[in-house]
Image (cartoon, rainbow, N blue to C red):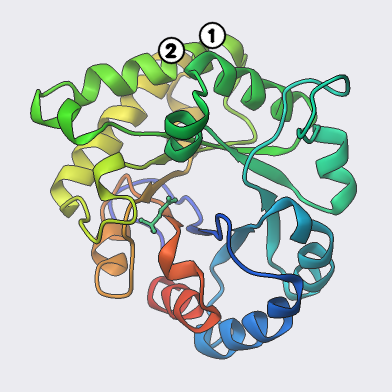
């Protein structure tokens, strides 16, 4: 297992996000291709799939040591919330947690940081994992507001969560998602270091040092190694390059 040379040993994690792609029939061949390409890399891998695929993906993935996540979840256990999925429902599929606060959910469905925090807290109470996404837009970066925006996005999360257990943070600059533009390694490392500092201020050093912070935004084969070589970058949250098993497996091989 490779860990950052300068930082404490945090196991690397590669999380794929299929977004609204794929059907159940795609799963077996995807996993075969992924396994062949990863060449036995021992990297922890999670896959966030559409709700309709959760049960079948979990059944196929668990024997192969791959964990399944939802791409969203509702904070309440049950009730009149048409179209929503609760944490007990998610758990019943075999999923181990969910992505919360992806920028596409914030942007297209108006999810506030408070709503994201409530979801993360509910997942934590259920001892399921929350991959909490934060990130600035191009305008915010251009105006030099990146750190302020990230602080504002994290503040409700810090208020709602008594500890940072069962949390993975994902820094995903909105301008880098699906655009082919990746943050440079120094831009990403600077932000990851800043985020870890905020976590340290809130929860103290051991939890901050143990927290995995993923980078997301056009991660692919030709940048993944440089990104995860940075001391505060512990893996990736990958959209486009997770859609083909071969490409996702290749990412696992490169950082394994
Ligand atoms: P991308 O998506 O890898 O296609 O940029 C990342 C994400 O949205 O999580």
Q: Is residue 54 left or right of residue 165?
A: right
Q: Is residue 101 above or below residue 237?
A: above
Q: Which mark is residue 155?
A: 2
Real-space CA distance between mark 1 and mark 2, rounded to the nearest whole angstrom: 6 Å
* Residue in front for this viewpoint, 252 or 116: 116
Q: Does residue 173 appear in the picture of this structure?
A: no
Q: Which mark is residue 159?
A: 1
Q: Quadrant of ligand 1?
A: bottom left
Q: Is residue 119 left or right of residue 102?
A: right
Residue at x-position 61% and y-position 84%: 35
Q: Position of residue 86 (x, y in %)?
A: 81, 32
Q: Is residue 69 left or right of residue 104?
A: right
Q: Is residue 21 above or below residue 7?
A: below
Q: Is the residue marked by circle 2 packed among few (<14), some (14-19), or many (20+) residues within 10 Å?
A: some
Q: Position of residue 235 (x, y in %)?
A: 42, 56
Q: Quadrant of residue 60?
A: bottom right
Circle 1: element type: helix
Q: Is residue 40 above or below residue 125?
A: below
């Amino acid at each position: 297992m490779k860990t950052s040379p300068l930082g404490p040993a945090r196991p690397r994690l590669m999380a794929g996000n299929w977004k609204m792609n794929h059907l159940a029939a795609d799963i077996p061949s995807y996993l075969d291709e992924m396994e062949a390409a990863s060449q036995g890399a021992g990297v922890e891998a999670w896959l966030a799939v559409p709700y309709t695929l959760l049960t079948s993906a979990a059944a196929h993935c668990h024997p192969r040591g791959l964990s399944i996540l939802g791409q969203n979840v509702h904070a309440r256990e049950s009730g009149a919330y048409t179209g929503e999925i609760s944490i007990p429902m998610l758990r019943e599929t075999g999923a181990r947690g969910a992505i919360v606060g992806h920028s596409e959910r914030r942007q297209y469905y108006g999810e506030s940081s408070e709503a994201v925090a409530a979801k993360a807290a509910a997942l934590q109470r259920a001892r399921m994992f929350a991959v909490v996404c934060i990130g600035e837009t191009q305008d915010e970066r251009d105006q030099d507001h990146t750190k302020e925006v990230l602080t504002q996005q994290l503040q409700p999360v810090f208020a709602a969560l008594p500890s940072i257990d069962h949390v993975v943070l994902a820094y995903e600059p909105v301008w880098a998602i699906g655009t082919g533009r990746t943050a440079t390694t120094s831009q990403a490392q600077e932000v990851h270091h800043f985020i870890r500092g905020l976590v340290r201020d809130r929860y103290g050093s051991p939890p901050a040092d143990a927290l995995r912070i993923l980078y997301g935004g056009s991660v692919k084969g030709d940048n993944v190694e440089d990104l995860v070589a940075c001391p505060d970058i512990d893996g990736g949250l990958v959209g486009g390059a997770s859609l083909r098993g071969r490409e996702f497996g290749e990412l696992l091989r490169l950082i394994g």
